[in-house]
């Protein structure tokens, strides 16, 4: 239980960093592309930064499921793939708010925060279960030999 709480707190801290990346990319790109495209670009940038931080901070010391076969690029792809659910939650809320709420069109940070909070919860559960889940079997085999 202590590990779960520690990971949840670390995941949230990394999420704050991701939020700042998201906001920065949004601000830098929204004058170049539509608001919705800028939001998608900001999400990809934030997902990449948070994957790297989760790997080295949130879930450090945990082996990937197939530690011998999962390289960094592949783990990044798995991270993005399994977190697409949280990304869809984020983007759906972001799109809906920026499309239908005038205050969110003027200040999209509101939509980023609302979508980000719900996406964070989904992504933590998905990342913990599918990307950074410690493989128990190899540890048992190593201990038995």
Image (spheres, helix red, strand yellow):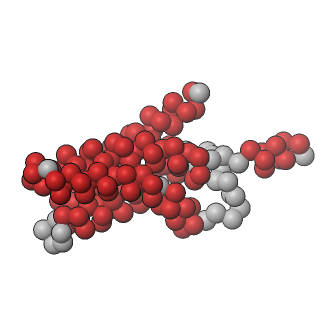
The percent position of residue 136, horizontal first and vertical second, equals 74, 44
Q: Judge left or right: residue 124 versus residue 115.
A: right
x 84%, y 47%: residue: 141
Q: Quadrant of the N terminus?
A: top right
Q: Quadrant of residue 40?
A: bottom left
At x 14%, y 50%, the residue is 101
Horizontally, is 126 left or right of 47 in the view? right
Q: Find the residue positioned furthest to the top.
A: 2
Q: Position of residue 125 (x, y in %)?
A: 51, 43
The quadrant holding residue 33 is: bottom left
**Residue 24 x/y as whole percent:** 22, 56
**Horizontal and vertical percent for residue 11?**
44, 41
Residue at 21% across / 51% down in the picture? 97
In the rendered view, tell whether residue 84 sits above or below residue 143: below
Asked whether the viewer can see residue 19, the reply is no
* Residue found at the very far right of the displayed protein: 145
Q: How many marks?
A: 0
Residue 132 in sight from this viewpoint? yes
* Relative horizontal placement of residue 34, taking residue 118 as reference (left or right): left
In the depicted view, which residue is nearer to us: 89 or 58?
89
Q: Nearer the viewer, residue 55 or 101?
A: 101
Residue farthest along the front direction in this orientation: 100
Q: Residue at x 19, y 46 (%)?
A: 110
């Amino acid at each position: 239980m202590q590990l779960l709480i520690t990971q949840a707190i670390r995941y949230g801290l990394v999420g704050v960093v991701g939020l700042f990346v998201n906001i920065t990319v949004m601000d830098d790109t929204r004058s170049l592309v539509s608001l919705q495209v800028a939001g998608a670009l900001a999400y990809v940038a934030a997902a990449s930064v948070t994957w790297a931080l989760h790997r080295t901070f949130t879930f450090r010391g945990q082996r990937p499921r197939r530690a011998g076969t999962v390289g960094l690029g592949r783990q990044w792809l798995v991270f993005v793939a399994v977190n697409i659910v949280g990304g869809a939650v984020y983007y759906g809320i972001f799109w809906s708010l920026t499309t239908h709420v005038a205050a969110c069109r003027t200040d999209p940070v509101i939509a980023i925060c609302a979508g980000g909070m719900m996406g964070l919860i989904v992504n933590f559960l998905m990342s913990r279960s599918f990307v950074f889940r410690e493989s128990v079997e190899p540890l048992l085999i190593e201990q038995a030999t």
